């Protein structure tokens, strides 16, 4: 694999056809919460800390979507992305996403039908010409390598069943990917590669006729959607949902009306026509663009990998991160809300329905005493949520650990300390009475529960209503 220097700055299930979709799009009689009903069994599974099963994009297992944010200060060394550190971040992220004990267990949870015959595509985003900002090979290849170490029978998942792809070979080559259409190693080529091309059949996306890449149709039985962290002057944000503009041949015809409903319509039609291939969405958030996207150099360093099985929830969090850095185009990202509503129902756009797990510096704890730093930790959804007088915060450990649990406001100021000390393996519950450290009642609003275990950090948002 070629290596190139990237840093340019030093700053820090109901299916309907297209006509039915358009007629139903603004039907006020269909409630999102009625459509996405929380089942009792799913509630019990979440409450007990059982494995987080990846859900079908259009048929939710439950109303809560999990987004994992992994950041590591060692992800970059000078101008270069450290692929070995990225690999640690990826493995930590998929374990947290699935509540799995090992990366192999996590991949098998994400791809329950994984076999030596199953082709998995990794759809990257290379719109920006080198050396601006696109999905980095130092992120894509560690993901593929981690997946390829998953046991399949007496062997492991074959590398040549993994295809890293985007629109054209030349963009992949410019960015340092290795074009490979052989039967050996991780494959990589574009939709314009000899013998690939686009479908003969046409998708009508809100009046725009599109043909789908055969990288998607023929080579991706399942899909990992691997985008990058950028705002967008037309759609507000380039995220998991918009990354599929590179799956079809003429995305330039779908940029009217802030790309809404083109983006949700395209995602929905891909599912309707070719099945629910997409099992995992990842954002290469090592660097980001908050003001001049989608084309241009990186404007800040984030040192992150962000992932979810829910593309809508992932895009909500990506937009929040961009806005924290000063992005002003979020108001035109209406496609995210549209994607969450009938007739699309592609995921959760309400932050209340999004569980956030944050992991910091997993490379710093990899060699530490496993009796102090747990390999597996889960900060569960508090209940009730929202709450008005008090809420219970569950967590699960698989090893002994020294932990601290604190509550912060959205400005990052600590408002209450809940627990600090050692815990044994198992499930634990802690209560917050909705009061500040001084004993006065906290005002209504959103807060962040922070769980620290050594140098690892996890967090989730909670809502106090009075």
Image (tube, helix red, strand yellow):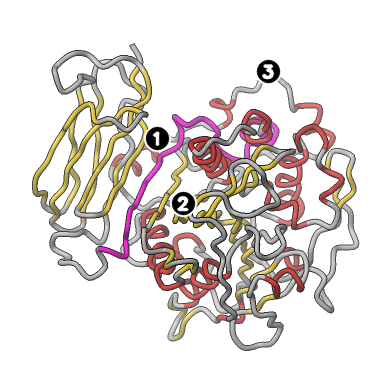
The reply to whether the magenta stretch includes residue 349 is yes
Residue under label 3? 28
Specify the segment rendered in magenta.
338-364
Q: Are marks 1 and 2 in contact (CB under 8 Å)?
A: no
The reply to whether the magenta stretch includes residue 125 is no
Distance in Å between CA atoms under marks 1 and 2: 38 Å
Q: Report helix, strand or loop for mark 2.
A: strand
Q: Residue furthest left?
A: 421
What numbered label is drawn on residue 251? none
Vertical side of 247 occupied by 403: above or below: above
At label 1, counting other C-alpha atoms closer than 10 Å, the crowd grade (few under 14, some 14-19, many 20 or more) is few
At label 3, counting other C-alpha atoms closer than 10 Å, the crowd grade (few under 14, some 14-19, many 20 or more) is few
Q: How many marks?
A: 3
Given residues 70 and 22, the one toward you in this image is 70
Q: Report helix, strand or loop for mark 3.
A: loop
What numbered label is drawn on residue 302? 2
Q: Who's the residue at 72% across and 39% down the image?
A: 233
Q: Say whether residue 142 is left or right of residue 251.
A: left
**Image quadrant occupied by the N terminus:** bottom right
Q: Who's the residue at 47% across and 81% down the image?
A: 156
Residue under label 1? 40
Distance in Å between CA atoms under marks 2 and 3: 39 Å
Q: Residue furthest top?
A: 466
Q: Say whether residue 6 is left or right of residue 43.
A: right
Q: Which is nearer the N-term, disc 1 or disc 2?
A: 1
Distance in Å between CA atoms under marks 3 and 1: 26 Å
Q: Quadrant of residue 183?
A: bottom right
Q: Who's the residue at 80% across and 75% down the image?
A: 193
Vertical side of 240 occupied by 4: above or below: below
Q: Report helix, strand or loop for mark 1.
A: helix
């Amino acid at each position: 694999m070629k290596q190139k220097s990237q840093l340019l700055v030093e700053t820090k299930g109901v299916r309907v056809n297209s006509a039915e979709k358009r007629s139903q799009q603004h039907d006020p009689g269909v409630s999102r919460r009625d459509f996405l009903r929380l089942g009792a069994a799913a509630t019990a599974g979440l409450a007990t800390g059982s494995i987080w099963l990846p859900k079908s994009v259009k048929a939710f297992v439950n109303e809560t979507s999990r987004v994992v944010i992994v950041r590591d200060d060692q992800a970059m060394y000078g101008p270069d992305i450290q692929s070995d550190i990225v690999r640690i971040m990826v493995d930590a992220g998929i374990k947290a996403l699935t509540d799995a004990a090992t990366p192999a267990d996590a991949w098998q949870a994400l791809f329950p039908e994984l076999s030596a015959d199953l082709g998995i595509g990794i759809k990257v985003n290379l719109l920006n010409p080198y050396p601006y900002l696109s999905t980095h090979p130092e992120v894509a290849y560690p993901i593929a390598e981690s997946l390829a170490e998953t046991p399949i029978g007496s062997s492991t998942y074959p590398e040549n069943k993994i295809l890293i792809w985007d629109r054209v070979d030349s963009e992949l080559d410019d960015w340092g990917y290795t074009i490979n259409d052989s039967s050996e190693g991780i494959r990589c080529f574009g939709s314009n590669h000899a013998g690939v091309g686009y479908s003969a059949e046409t998708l009508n996306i809100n009046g725009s006729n599109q043909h789908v890449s055969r990288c998607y149709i023929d080579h991706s039985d399942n899909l990992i959607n691997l985008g990058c962290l950028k705002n967008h002057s037309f759609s507000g944000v380039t995220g998991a949902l918009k990354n599929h503009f590179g799956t079809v041949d003429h995305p330039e015809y779908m940029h009217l009306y802030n790309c809404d409903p083109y983006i949700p319509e395209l995602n929905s039609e891909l599912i309707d026509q070719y099945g629910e291939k997409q099992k995992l969405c990842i954002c290469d958030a090592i660097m980001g663009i908050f003001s001049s996207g989608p084309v241009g150099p990186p404007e800040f360093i984030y040192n992150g990998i962000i992932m979810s099985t829910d593309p809508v929830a992932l895009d909500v969090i990506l937009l929040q991160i961009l806005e924290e850095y000063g992005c002003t185009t979020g108001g035109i990202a209406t496609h995210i809300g549209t994607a969450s509503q009938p007739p699309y129902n592609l995921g959760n756009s309400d932050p209340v329905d999004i569980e956030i797990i944050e992991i910091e510096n997993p490379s710093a704890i990899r060699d530490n005493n496993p009796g102090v730093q747990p390999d597996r930790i889960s900060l569960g959804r508090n209940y009730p949520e929202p709450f008005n007088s008090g809420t219970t915060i569950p967590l699960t450990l698989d090893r002994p650990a020294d932990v601290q649990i604190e509550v912060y406001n959205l400005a990052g100021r600590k408002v209450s300390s809940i627990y600090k000390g050692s815990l044994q393996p198992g499930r634990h519950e802690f209560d917050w009475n909705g009061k500040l450290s001084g004993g006065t009642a906290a005002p209504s609003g959103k807060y962040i529960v922070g769980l620290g275990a050594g140098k690892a950090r996890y967090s989730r948002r909670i809502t106090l209503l009075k």
